[in-house]
Image (tube, rainbow, N blue to C red):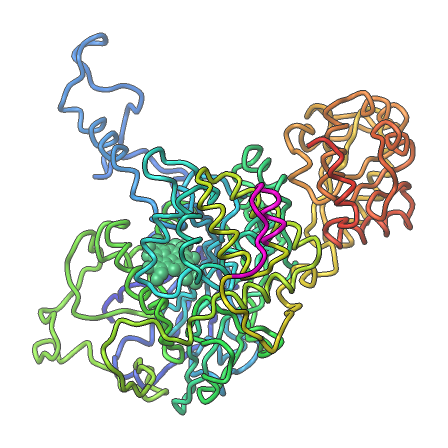
């Protein structure tokens, strides 16, 4: 049997056994092709082939790229110890030349990102909806690689900026790669792909001084969106808490566009893809997000990395909203318009399966940086809709990789290689690594026996067939009239928010527009966009900016059948438990060690975690005389990195904390950020020192009842009722 082009997504044998199905699948096609059985059915063979791409230098000699062992990696070859370096030093030249070319162009958008491996498993056989194999076999674990990203900032920018987050998933299915390249918001800024370069140029740092990094609070962004009303809906999402997610693990994901699922009978349904995280969906506060951008630029990627390392594997449920082809036109909006969502109250989500991320990459560059997603990567059983934004995306992604990854062979990189074998007549080009055998790189041919051959589209064969949609139209450059309502869904979103979410939206517009220098841009956004979404919203923002209050919108309000969609509010998206939450425990010498042990036990039972923080990172001695290792100093792991704070009693410890400005600031900041705080034993005395009062999230006591109240407050994510009072606390 001749060696096949190996195809696996970069999985090591021991760690990935759980990801790979050992089930042997032989299709008529694989038998016809003669050798495909190995690649399609034998997962061990896949794993073995993958290992060829991994390099483990443990126990190995240092060598040049030509395999020559290196004797001295400290000194260049010189004419005498103090003499000039010699050009013939091939070892130094090879090393420096390679280093000189280490950087590749970063992604034009979504440059800042982080990735993880995992698997997807279908809950059931969804054959009625699709013939895609990975959605039909509930026993099958399909390997995935996911990359989360921000949009605006460069590779080294902060994680917690106000921005949309990318949520891109590569499914390595047996029938080829399927890339679901989505975002954490269900709509987009523009309706037609031809506007994308304009939008991106506007949001990116301004061209003269390359500022700001990682945010949209600047003139060119607001100039563009205030002139383009179709952006109104997405902009309000970007001004909402969704743009400052608490963690990547707690983000919802959306395919945004309508796609199609096609079953074996060729029947099509429109679908919208949704990812729903098991830990619930919640956000940072704006003040926290800004502070974290400085205190821990890597806050999101660190959280994801650590969660996977400790076995808190992030999980999402994949679901679809299903719309029959004949219902395409039954909505008050066009399902092909990517600035519209389909409210879940109108079309509920059908759960399909779950995704678990259980392995961090071995090498950021080789995996996370070189992964190449494309919405055009689909498999039989999935198809596109005519959404004009999606249509443009279908070519842009592979095109961009050609300059980013240096040629058209990026599909051969280990992270991008499909699990399914690939054979065709494409040849050569930069960085070709497959050694194609045979003489015939054309089809049809008789010289190589006619291989590789086409596969008929019948479902059991697996040849891809596009949905047989009837198109009868004029060639025309025109926006459909059905795309013309830009404000109803922005209003629906605003109306669906809880009170505190609405306040955050007002604050975000006020903050961002406050950073805009040109008064006419601020005014245009308030008068011509916000006033058409909601007059109260527009007035509040106008007041904060010192602008005249708008009295009416500039376009007639359309009456919609739905005025609120509770599914859009994060207030309704909490998990109800405290799994994976992080509690800071403030300690000093003389701390009550028994209280810490009780807390740790209770947190463990709930699947949550505690970290001990001291005045320095030196160990402390408890009141019981036990030496307690400290995880970090309070300055090293600030309160913004935690969900809640616990202060155990112990007279000596509390005396020390009460006189320590860092500890007091820690508690005040946690209070200001509406976090649950528990003061145990003597820690009660801190209330007076801090000038704070007990509330439903500021709990005094350390017995089982107090811990229960503390945990209940953590599960609520924030003590929202405290928000007005918290403003009085210095930031
Ligand atoms: Fe992208 N987008 N995009 N985009 N996008 C890219 O492809 C593009 C859009 C999204 O982690 C680029 O490989 C066009 C919508 C994600 O590697 C580029 C249009 C949505 C990622 C590109 C859109 C997205 C990208 C840059 C309008 C949500 C990161 C690097 C027609 C549904 C993927 C790259 C990763 C990346 C083009 C609009 C999501 C330039 C032309 C809508 C998550 O090809």
Give the percent coordinates (x, y) of residue 262: 41, 83
Specify the quadrant of the image occupied by residue 685.
top right
- Comparing 334 with 94, the one in front is 334
Residue appearing at x 83%, y 29% in the figure: 690
Residue 152, compared with residue 69, is above or below; it is below
Residue 559 visible in the picture: yes
Specify the quadrant of the image occupied by residue 645.
top right
Furthest residue toward top: 82
**Is residue 561 found left or right of 430 in the rendered image?**
right
> Could you tell me how many numbered marks the image carries?
0
Indicate whether residue 170 is drawn in magenta. no
Residue appearing at x 33%, y 68% in the figure: 376
- Comparing 188 with 644, the one in front is 188
- Comparing 379 with 14, the one in front is 379
Residue 49 visible in the picture: no
Furthest residue toward bottom: 265
Q: Which residues are magenta?
A: 538-553
Residue 679, compared with residue 257, is above or below; it is above
Quadrant location of the C terminus in the rendered image: top right
**Is residue 668 found left or right of 135 in the rendered image?**
right
**Is residue 9 found left or right of 281 in the rendered image?**
left
Give the percent coordinates (x, y) of residue 342: 53, 73
Residue 434, compared with residue 488, is above or below; it is above
Quarter of the displayed picture in which ligand 1 can be seen: bottom left
Indicate whether residue 545 is drawn in magenta. yes
Give the percent coordinates (x, y) of residue 683: 87, 32
Quadrant location of the N terminus in the rendered image: bottom left
Specify the quadrant of the image occupied by residue 99.
top left
Residue appearing at x 52%, y 43% in the figure: 512
């Amino acid at each position: 049997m001749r060696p096949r082009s190996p195809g696996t997504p970069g999985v090591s044998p021991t760690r990935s056994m759980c990801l790979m199905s050992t089930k042997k699948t032989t299709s008529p096609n694989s038998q016809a092709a003669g050798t495909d059985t190995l690649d399609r059915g034998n997962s061990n063979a896949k794993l073995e082939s993958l290992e060829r791409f991994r390099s483990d230098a443990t126990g190995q000699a240092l060598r040049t790229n030509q395999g020559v062992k290196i004797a001295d990696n400290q000194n260049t070859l010189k004419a005498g110890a103090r003499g000039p370096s010699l050009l013939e030093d091939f070892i130094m030249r090879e090393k420096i030349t390679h280093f000189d070319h280490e950087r590749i162009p970063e992604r034009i958008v979504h440059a800042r990102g982080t990735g993880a491996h995992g698997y997807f498993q279908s809950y059931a056989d969804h054959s009625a909806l699709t013939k895609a194999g990975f959605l039909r076999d509930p026993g099958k674990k399909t390997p995935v690689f996911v990359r989360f990203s921000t949009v605006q900032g460069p590779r080294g920018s902060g994680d917690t900026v106000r921005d949309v987050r990318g949520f891109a998933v590569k499914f390595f299915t047996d029938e080829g790669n399927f890339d679901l390249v989505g975002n954490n918001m269900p709509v987009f800024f523009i309706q037609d792909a031809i506007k994308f370069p304009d939008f991106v140029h506007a949001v990116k740092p301004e061209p003269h001084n390359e500022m700001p990094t990682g945010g949209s609070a600047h003139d060119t962004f607001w100039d563009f969106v205030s002139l383009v009303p179709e952006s109104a809906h997405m902009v309000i999402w970007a001004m909402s808490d969704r743009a400052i997610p608490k963690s990547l693990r707690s983000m919802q994901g959306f395919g945004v566009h309508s796609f199609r699922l096609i079953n074996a009978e060729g029947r099509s349904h429109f679908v919208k893809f949704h990812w729903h995280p098991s830990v619930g969906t919640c956000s940072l506060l704006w003040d926290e997000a800004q502070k974290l951008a400085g205190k821990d630029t890597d806050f999101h990627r660190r959280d994801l990395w650590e969660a996977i390392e400790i076995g808190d594997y992030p999980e999402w449920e994949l679901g679809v909203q299903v719309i029959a082809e004949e219902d395409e036109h039954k909505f008050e909006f066009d399902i092909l318009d990517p600035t519209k969502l389909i409210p879940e109250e109108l079309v509920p989500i059908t759960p399909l399966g779950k995704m678990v991320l259980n392995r961090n990459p071995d090498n950021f560059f080789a995996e996370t940086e070189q992964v190449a997603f494309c919405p055009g990567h689909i498999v039989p059983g999935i198809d596109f809709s005519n959404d004009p934004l999606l249509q443009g995306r279908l070519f842009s992604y592979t095109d961009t990789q050609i300059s980013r990854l240096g040629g058209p062979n990026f599909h051969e990189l280990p992270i991008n290689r499909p699990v399914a074998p690939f054979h065709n007549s494409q040849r050569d080009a930069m960085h070709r690594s497959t050694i194609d055998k045979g003489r015939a790189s054309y089809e049809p041919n008789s010289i190589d026996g006619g291989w590789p051959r086409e596969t008929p589209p019948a479902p059991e064969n697996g040849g891809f067939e596009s949905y047989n949609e009837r198109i009868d139209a004029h060639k025309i450059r025109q926006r459909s009239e059905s795309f013309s309502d830009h404000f109803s869904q922005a209003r629906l979103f605003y109306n669906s928010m809880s009170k505190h979410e609405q306040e955050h939206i007002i604050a975000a517009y006020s903050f961002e527009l406050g950073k805009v220098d040109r008064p006419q841009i601020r005014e245009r956004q308030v008068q011509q966009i916000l006033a058409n979404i909601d007059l109260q919203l527009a007035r509040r923002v106008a007041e904060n900016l010192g602008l005249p209050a708008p009295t009416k919108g500039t376009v007639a309000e359309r009456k919609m059948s739905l005025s609120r969609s509770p599914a859009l509010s994060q207030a309704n998206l909490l998990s109800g438990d405290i799994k994976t939450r992080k509690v800071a425990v403030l300690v000093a010498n003389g701390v009550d060690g028994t209280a810490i042990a009780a807390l740790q036990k209770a947190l463990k039972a709930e699947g949550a975690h505690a970290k001990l923080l001291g005045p320095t990172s030196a160990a402390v001695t408890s009141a019981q005389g036990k030496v307690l290792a400290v995880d970090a100093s309070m300055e090293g792991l600030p309160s913004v990195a935690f969900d809640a704070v616990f202060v155990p009693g112990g007279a000596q410890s509390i005396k020390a904390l009460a006189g320590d400005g860092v500890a007091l600031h820690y508690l005040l900041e946690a209070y200001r950020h509406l976090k649950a705080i528990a003061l145990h034993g003597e820690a009660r005395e801190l209330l007076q020192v801090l000038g704070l009062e007990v509330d439903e999230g500021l709990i005094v006591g350390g017995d089982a009842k107090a811990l229960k109240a503390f945990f209940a407050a953590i599960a609520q994510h924030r003590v929202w009722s405290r928000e007005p009072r918290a403003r009085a606390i210095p930031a």
